[in-house]
Image: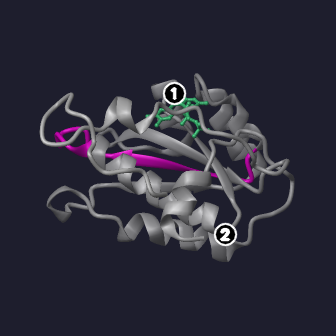
Amino acid sequence: MDVYELVRTKLETRDFSQKQVPDKIKLKILEAARFTQSGNNSQHWRFILLDKKDELDKLAEDSLYGKWVRNANFAIIVLTDPSLGYHKIDAGRAVQSMQLTAWGEGVASGVFVGVKDQELRKDFGIPANLAPTITVGFGYPARKVLGRKNRKQLSEIAFQHSFGSPLEIKNQL
Ligand SMILES: Cc1cc2nc3c(=O)[nH]c(=O)nc-3n(C[C@H](O)[C@H](O)[C@H](O)COP(=O)(O)O)c2cc1C
């Protein structure tokens, strides 16, 4: 799939099969994060790979809206430096790289942000100077990922020349 097709077809997945994702793919996903750009090329991010059942159970307990991660094959906690104004942008870009790389390998994923901060820090040894900004759960999907995305029309969100001025480009896709 080309990049556009990966973006177009990737749906957030929270229901995973028990099939193991090979280590080679986990590494490729982490490398995709590493190759992503960051503000000032500061690479302030750190990534914690969790791929043991008890780790995923703990992660689920420490999450507010990510209990589903218990059934993921593995997860990656993305830590960023909150003193940098752009740290969440960097986290989002790294996550997008990882999710699209995974999807290119047939591995689905979902993210969550809300966590019980102190518990998560204690369970996974997260240092005080880094924030657990976003976590991604990965795995082969339990069923075929099919479906339409619930998205606004392009005409509602994209303009040409000035805000509110309609696109002149005709849709040829
Ligand atoms: C910044 C951000 C935070 C999110 N937080 C959560 C979350 O805490 N728990 C969760 O289950 N999904 C979370 N999501 C997933 C969104 O709900 C999902 O991307 C959105 O519903 C679109 O899904 P779709 O691509 O399958 O249409 C989050 C997504 C983003 C980008």
Q: Residue at x 86, y 53 (%)?
A: 18
| Residue under label 2 | 105
The amino acid type found where label 2 is placed reads Glu
Q: Earlier in the sequence, mark 1 or mark 2?
A: 2
Type of the residue with mark 1: Val
Q: Nearer the viewer, residue 137 or 9?
A: 9
Question: Above or below — where is 148 with respect to 170?
Answer: above
At horizontal 71% and vertical 39% (from top left) the residue drawn is: 14
Identify the element where label 1 is drawn. loop
49 left or right, relative to 22? left
Label disc, if present, on residue 115 of the rendered structure: 1
Does the CB distance between marks 1 and 2 fall below 8 Å? Answer: no
Q: Pick whichever, 2 or 130, lies toward us.
A: 2
Q: Which span is picked out in magenta? A: 72-87
Spatial distance from mark 1 to mark 2, Cα to Cα? 28 Å
| Residue located at (18% from left, 39% from top) | 83
Please state the horizontal and vertical placement of residue 56, each as a whole percent of the image: 70, 43
Q: Residues within 10 Å of mark 2 (few under 14, many from 20)?
A: some
The residue located at (45%, 34%) in the rendering is 153
